[in-house]
Amino acid sequence: MGSKSLFFFAILSISLAFSLPPAFAENEEITGTDPGLVMNFYKDSCPQAEDIIKEQVKLLYKRHKNTAFSWLRNIFHDCAVQSCDASLLLDSTRRSLSEKETDRSFGLRNFRYLDTIKEAVERECPGVVSCSDILVLSARDGIVSLGGPYIPLKTGRRDGRKSRAEILEEYLPDHNESMSVVLDRFSAIGINTPGVVALLGAHSVGRTHCVKLVHRLYPEVDPELNPDHVEHMLHKCPDAIPDPKAVQYVRNDRGTPMVLDNNYYRNILDNKGLLIVDHQLAADKRTKPYVKKMAKSQDYFFKEFGRAITILSENNPLTGTKGEIRKQCSVVNKHN
């Protein structure tokens, strides 16, 4: 074959490569066009995104301080269940129950304020920033509002299109579960024992509803509870069968209820933990050494807490062309 023929076939091969339809193109992940999660993912597509989210979190915290507890709880309830993809935020449909309406999600609230943040971001950059990234970044900034550490978190998540209500209990440990179950559930997503102890330090802030506590007070008081704390608990939860619609609760930490700090660990070592899981954390031989260490050192608590939140936030995200960027966080996009 002559040199002219070789040149012709070379040109033809290049032309075909550029004209192949998408179905014949290489997989996006193989070609490397999906960067996955990266720091400051929106630096080009929406440079103001993280600043807008941070400012909205500050404004909402100033008006409604309990929003920060919600942001912190959201990241656990969303990211621990298969994927960090904002499935938690979806409303129920005729075909599926939403995650946020299940018993395991009792007490979750303030979702309307996430919509407020989403709307502010959409005004700047329509259709660019995912609800799952807003959920994660609002948690990061909410932690700072509560006096906790600033945790650098990656972005680039996309939103899922289905609720996982039917499998929640396979992933989210209940407050009455054994410590073995709690440790196993978190281990499955890469969080080790000190990480679990640190994550439960989120119980340093917020409140626990009486419906979650009364089994430790009625018909008999749990002998493991500190007697000095029992009187306060009985005052706050006077009914053996509380009305679930009534706002009856006990602050998780009476000393610094609005501050994410290591006071929680001192409390549970003093048998002032409200939930069974709090008591077990301070009693179990696998976790007690870390409880003691965090009770002595807030720096150590913050270090392990930041590491655990980072792992949680990176649990099996949708990236690249997977999922979608929801226009509204409570509903999937309509596709023609």
Image: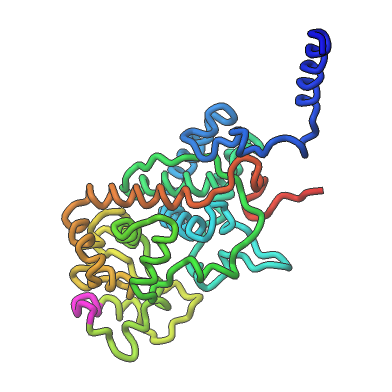
Figure disc tally? 0
Q: Residue at x 79, y 11 (%)?
A: 7
Relative to 97, residue 260 above or below: above
Point out the image quarter for the N terminus: top right
Please provide percent x and percent y for residue 128: 63, 37
Please provide percent x and percent y for residue 291: 22, 62
Instruction: Using the image as rendered, state which of residue 223 and residue 217 is in the foreground.
Output: 223
Quadrant assignment, res 164: bottom right
* For residue 193, side relative to residue 166 (left or right): left
- Please give the range of residues in magenta: 224-231
Q: Residue at x 57, y 31 (%)?
A: 46
Q: Residue furthest left?
A: 296
* For residue 269, side relative to residue 181 (left or right): left
Please provide percent x and percent y for residue 292: 18, 61
The reply to whether the magenta stretch includes residue 226 is yes
The structure's colour scheme is rainbow
Relative to 196, residue 242 above or below: below
Instruction: Using the image as rendered, state which of residue 45 and residue 124 is in the foreground.
Output: 45
Q: Residue at x 43, y 69 (%)?
A: 173
The reply to whether the magenta stretch includes residue 252 is no
Please provide percent x and percent y for residue 59: 46, 43
What kind of secondary structure does the magenta stretch mostly adopt? helix
Instruction: Using the image as rendered, state which of residue 32 and residue 333 is in the foreground.
Output: 32
Quadrant assignment, res 267: bottom left
Q: Residue furthest front?
A: 1
